[in-house]
Every structure is written in C-alpha cells, then in structure tokens.
Image (spheres, grey):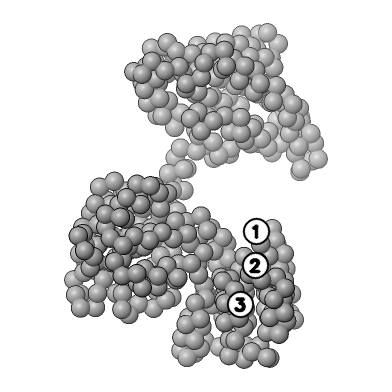
Amino acid sequence: MNPILLVEDSAMLGRLAKAKIEQAFDTSVYWCKSLADADNLLKRAGGNFSMALLDFNLPDAPYGEVIDRVVSEGISSLVFTSDMTNEVRKQVWSKKVADYILKEDPNCLDYIIAAMKQLVENENTLVLVVDDSKSQRTAISDLLYVHKYRVLNAKDGETALAILEQYPEIKLVITDYHMPGMDGCKLCQRIREKYKHDRLAIIGLSSEEDRTLGARFVKSGANDFLVKQSFLVEEFYCRITHCLDILHLIEKNREGAIKDFLTGIYNRRYFFDQGEKLLADCQEKNRNLFCTMLDLDFFKNINDQYGHDAGDQVLKHFAALLTGETESKEIVARIGGEEFCILSPDFPADEYRLKVEKLRKTIAASPVTVPSNKTTIQVTASIGWAQLPAESLDTLLQAADANLYLAKEHGRNCAVG
C-alpha cells in the first residue's frame, strides 16, 4: 500500500491522526501543516499516495484550496472540517472528495479509519455502469473512481450482459432506463435470470419526468434507484455502500455456513455436499478421484503441554499449509478436531502418490511458531488415501480412513495408500 498524505495544521490532531492511521495500516503517513508544504511534497512524490486526509481550513488555504491541489493528482481524499454549513458542504462535495468528517465528533478518528479501510476494500470491487450517453457514463464513473472502485462501462443492455458473462466478479450494476434496444428495467430482468439478489446488486437511474420508474426498477429486480437529474453526491455514495454492505453480510453468512470458524477452510458440511457432487461427476466421466485423510500426530499432547491457544495456532498453520499445497480444483476441509480431508480429481495415480509424499515432508519440515509463549512446535501428520472406484463418498472416506489407521500403526508421520 502506498503512503497516506495528511494535511492538518493542528499539532495535537495531526499527531493523533498520524498515529492512529499508521497503527491501522501497514504504511507511512506523510504529515504536512500547510498548502505550501503539501504542494512541495506532491511535486517531489507526484501522485504516489494511496489516499489523503485534508483539513478544509489551513492558514494559507482557508477555503479548501488544498483539496483542489491534492485531487488534481488523482488522489482519493477525505476532508477534515469544523465548519459544515450548507455552503461549505456544497463546496466540499463539488471538489469530488470521497467523504468529509466533522472534527468536533468525538468518534471522528474512528470514522476516518473505517472510511479509509472501505476505500482500500473498494479497490477489489468491480462496478458496471450502463448508459447510452457517453457523458453520463463518464460522470458516474468519475464518481466511482473517487471511491477507488474498479469500473467497466457498457453503452447498452446487450453489451452489459456480455460484460457480465466475461466478468462474473462484478458486484454492482448501475443502469439508466432509456437505452436503445433494451431499456433498464428489461436489463434488470435479464440480469436476474442468472444473478440473484444475494450475488449482485443493481441500482437504476430513473428520470424526474416519470415518477413511476423507481417502482418499476425495483419490481424488475433492482435493489435501489436514484433520480438521475437531482441526486446528491453524498446520497449516491450512501446508496452504493448500502447495497454492497448487504451483499457483504450475505457473503459472510454464506461463508459462516460452509467454512470452519477457526481455520477458515471448508467444514464437514461443505465437504460432504460438494464432495458428493464431485464424486458423481468423476464416476460419470470416468475421471480419477482421490480422497486423502490427514491426522495431526499427538495433537492432544500439544494441547496438554502448550495449551489450547497453541493448539489453535497449530491447526490454523496446518490448514494454511494444506491450502498452499493444493490446487483450486481440490476440496480441502477440516472434518473434525485435528482431522482434515482432501478430495483431489484428475491426477494420475503415480503423480498423486508423489504429491502426497511431498505434502507429508512439507508438513514435517514446517514447525509452528507460537508468538504468545515464544514456542516452536514440531508437527507431523499421518496420512491415508484411497481412490475410485467407490460406491459412495462414505465408502471412499472409509477406505482412506482405514489407510490412515495403518499409517498410525506404522509409526505415524507416514502416508499409506
């Protein structure tokens, strides 16, 4: 992450803001106390700042002149101000800032950190803007760029659908109603045939001339709508944040249902749900499928000797190692306790045998450091694996588990298949 620019003439507030921001982000904060200092720094550093926090009123820039200077470098900026009259408010938003913060608010620094973290997260969010007017697409896109969103553009509905096919990671579509060939409501309906409300948000841009368009948009599948000619910039950002926050909460709930709470990898439920589908597909297409069971050796001794916190660190380390050593086509899950399982399709048998042995050696060569008690714990695993044919996932799992038992009987830290 590039450094963050702070321009604030108050020594106390500047020190507090700098310390808090540097604590929250793994980057440096360059603190200037005047427009002149900021101008000199920008001339040397150019636009190489990830974002900026700017005081609206400076001794040599009492009317927000520093905002124009920093924004001209393409730097997303938040504004500190103690004056938020309607006149100042309009002036601030006219300068294309990401947000403003009132200095008198006792929670202002916490709000700043949250707003900055949101800007960082926005860099991973892809938004599609659909409008037949190039000037309107540009205007909406420019507002999105201020909040560091990644943006794609489409001039009509058919182009928008093609872009969605190409970029399934798109999280938000902002679409006008009046377009040739396919209007915005029809586009919403087409989008909802494939992308439901829990995967993609849609905001419609309705017209002042037709007050019914907002309701028609929502009934066609949009999450929200804005009156294009009269929305406030602040309202625009609030509507977008609201839609994306709902998607984020749904995604967290979805992950909570299929991910192990401690290690972050898939849980037993997901393993059996998706494993049955993968097994059926491999059986139908005569593809190889391997099931590998892994059990941490003497894990109870680790908990007894070093404590459960250390045991949790070992489990998280082990899960991260398995994830790093497997491919995206494989399913890695924590089955329970210190037992983990991998389903691996499409590997030749000889290659998979070598893969499992390499995994065993990697585990043995990767001790776990526990920072809380400055302990290094040596970890090994017993491994059992089996492959199709098998009548069901249960029978495949039982065959792998039987080989895991043999690995333990052979002295642990070995693989049997």
Q: Quadrant of the C terminus?
A: top right
Which residue sits at x=51%, y=81%?
Answer: 95
Residue assigned mark 1: 1
- Near-viewer residue (211 or 166): 166
* First in residue order: circle 1 vs circle 3: 1
Residue assigned mark 3: 70
Relative vertical location of residue 164 with respect to residue 12 in this rendering, above or below: above
Per the rendering, the mark at residue 49 is 2
Kind of residue sitting beneath label 2? Phe
Q: Position of residue 128 (x, y in %)?
A: 38, 59
Q: Position of residue 64 (x, y in %)?
A: 58, 86
* First in residue order: circle 1 vs circle 2: 1
Q: Position of residue 258 (x, y in %)?
A: 46, 37
Could you tell whether 409 is left or right of 147 in the image? right
- Near-viewer residue (174 or 311): 174
Kind of residue sitting beneath label 3? Val
- Near-viewer residue (207 or 21): 207
Could you tell whether 135 is left or right of 182 in the image? right
Could you tell whether 109 is left or right of 258 in the image? right
Give the number of the mark in front: 1 or 3: 3
Which residue sits at x=32%, y=50%?
Answer: 162
Q: Residues within 10 Å of mark 1 (few under 14, many from 20)?
A: few
CA distance for labels 3 and 2? 10 Å
Relative vertical location of residue 98 with respect to residue 68 in this rendering, above or below: above
Q: Is residue 266 in view?
A: yes
